[in-house]
Image (cartoon, rainbow, N blue to C red):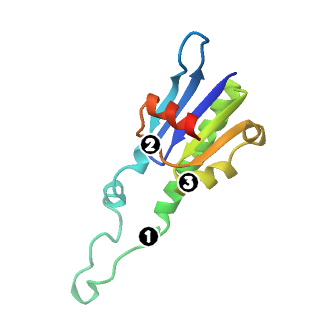
């Protein structure tokens, strides 16, 4: 039986193929690994030299901003989640597993699910709202057995 395991949070994405041979223990083969640079670091480090960053001096020293984007963090997050969902759709389509498992951070899990194709969702066996991106392959296999 072919299976795929997806492990993700906003900063990291890993896709594995579960390989089961009758004479061996199951193992995970990495299909794709990706780090999202946009998710790392502080917003101030990403936006340099923006208008309104420094005060105007004099009586208006507290006035800042020239149409600043107040929702830029949520826009970046939304873009990352959309990219994650697109990656999952492509991997499940190309690998065509009988079933697959998603381990995504609780904060983003539901948003990812809502953006997946219906055909991809039909094959989803387990959806765990947990950030397991730092676990080793062996630890992921153990976790998969327990859930």
CA gap between label 1 and label 3 equals: 26 Å
User: Mark 1 Cα within 10 Å, few/some/many (few <14, many 20+)?
Assistant: few
Q: Which residue is mark 1?
A: 68
- How far apart marks 2 and 3 lie (CA) works out to 14 Å
Q: Nearer the viewer, mark 1 or mark 2?
A: 2
Which residue is at 74% across, 36% downward?
123
Disc marking residue 145? none
Which callout, 2 or 3, points to the residue nearer the camera?
3
Where does the image place residue 138, in percent across and percent down from the top left? 45, 28
Tell me which residue sits at (71%, 25%) in the image: 96
- First-in-chain label (1 vs 3): 1
Q: For residue 78, say whether it is visible.
A: no
Residue 113, percent from left and from top: 66, 49
Q: Nearer the viewer, mark 1 or mark 3?
A: 3
Q: Callout 3: 10 Å neighbours few (<14), some, many (20+)?
A: some
Residue marked by disc 2: 36
Query: Where residue 108 is drawn, which disc sits there?
Result: 3
């Amino acid at each position: 039986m072919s299976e795929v395991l997806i492990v993700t949070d906003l900063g990291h994405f890993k896709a594995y193929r579960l390989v089961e041979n009758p004479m061996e223990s199951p193992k995970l083969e990495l299909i794709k690994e990706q780090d999202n640079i946009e998710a790392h670091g502080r917003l101030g480090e990403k936006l340099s030299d923006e208008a309104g960053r420094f005060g105007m001096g004099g009586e208006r020293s507290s006035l800042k901003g020239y149409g600043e984007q107040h929702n830029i963090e949520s826009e970046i997050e939304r873009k990352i989640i959309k990219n994650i969902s697109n990656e999952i759709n492509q991997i499940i389509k190309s690998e065509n597993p009988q079933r697959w498992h998603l381990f995504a951070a609780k904060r983003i899990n539901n948003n990812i699910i809502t953006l997946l194709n219906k055909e991809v969702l039909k094959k989803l066996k387990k959806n765990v709202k947990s950030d397991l991106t730092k676990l080793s392959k062996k630890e992921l296999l153990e976790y998969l057995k327990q859930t």
